[in-house]
Amino acid sequence: MTAVTVTADRTKFLRLALAADAVVTGGNGLIYLALAGPVGTLLGPDAGLLRGIGVFLLVYGVAVGLLAARRAISPAGTKAVIALNIIWTLGSVAAVVTGALEFTTIGAIWAIAQALVVGGFAELQIMGLRKARTN
C-alpha cells in the first residue's frame, strides 16, 4: 500500500475571498448600469453618477476575478485590491458623513452596509494573503 500525500492549495482562501469580491462587485456594477434611474431614485445619487460608478465596479470586478483565476495569485495585485477596498470603504463612510452624494436615508444605510461588506472583503483578503505566505 502506498501513501498518498495531499497538499492543500495555500492560496485557496485568498482565491475564494477575491472571487467573492469579484462577483459581488461586478453584480453591483451591472445593477448600477442597468437600473441607474430607479436605483438613483431609491438611493439619492443621480443616474449619471451611478452609471459611472457601475462602469468602474464592473471593470474592477472583472479585474479582481482575473486575479483570483490566475494560477499564481500576485501578492502585489492582491495588495492593490486590498488598498482599493479600504479606500472605497473610507470613501463610502465619508460620503455619508459629509452628505456629498445627497443620499436618501435608504441610500445612507446602503452605503454604510456596502462599506462594511467591502471592508470585510479587504480583511478576508489580508487574512488570505497571510495564509498563503505562512503555509
Image (spheres, rainbow, N blue to C red):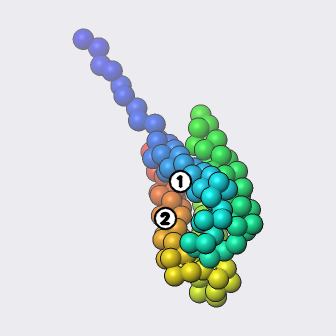
Q: Position of residue 90 (x, y in %)?
A: 60, 76
* Residue 24: numbered disc: 1
* Neighbour tally class for label 2: few under 14, some 14-19, many 20 plus, Cα within 10 Å: some
Camera-side residue: 57 or 42?
42
Camera-side residue: 50 or 135?
50
Specify which label sits upstream in the sequence, 1 or 2: 1
Quadrant of res 54 = bottom right
Name the residue that disc number 2 marks: 117
The residue that appears at 52% across and 68% down in the rendered structure is: 114
Q: Is residue 16 left or right of residue 41?
A: left
- Residue contact at pointers 1 and 2, CB within 8 angstroms: yes
Going by the numbered disc 2, the residue's amino acid type is: Val
Give the position of the N terminus as an image quadrant: top left
Q: Position of residue 57 (x, y in %)?
A: 66, 57
Give the position of the C terminus as an image quadrant: top left
The residue that appears at 46% across and 42% down in the rendered structure is: 12
* Residue 12: numbered disc: none
Rounded to the nearest whole Å, what is the CA distance between mark 1 and mark 2? Answer: 9 Å
Check disc 2 and report its element: helix, strand or loop: helix
The residue that appears at 60% across and 56% down in the rendered structure is: 31
| Residue 72 seen | no
Quick check: 117 above or below 102? above
Camera-side residue: 104 or 8?
104
| Residue 2 seen | yes
Q: Position of residue 118 (x, y in %)?
A: 53, 64
Camera-side residue: 69 or 134?
69
Q: Position of residue 77 (x, y in %)?
A: 66, 51
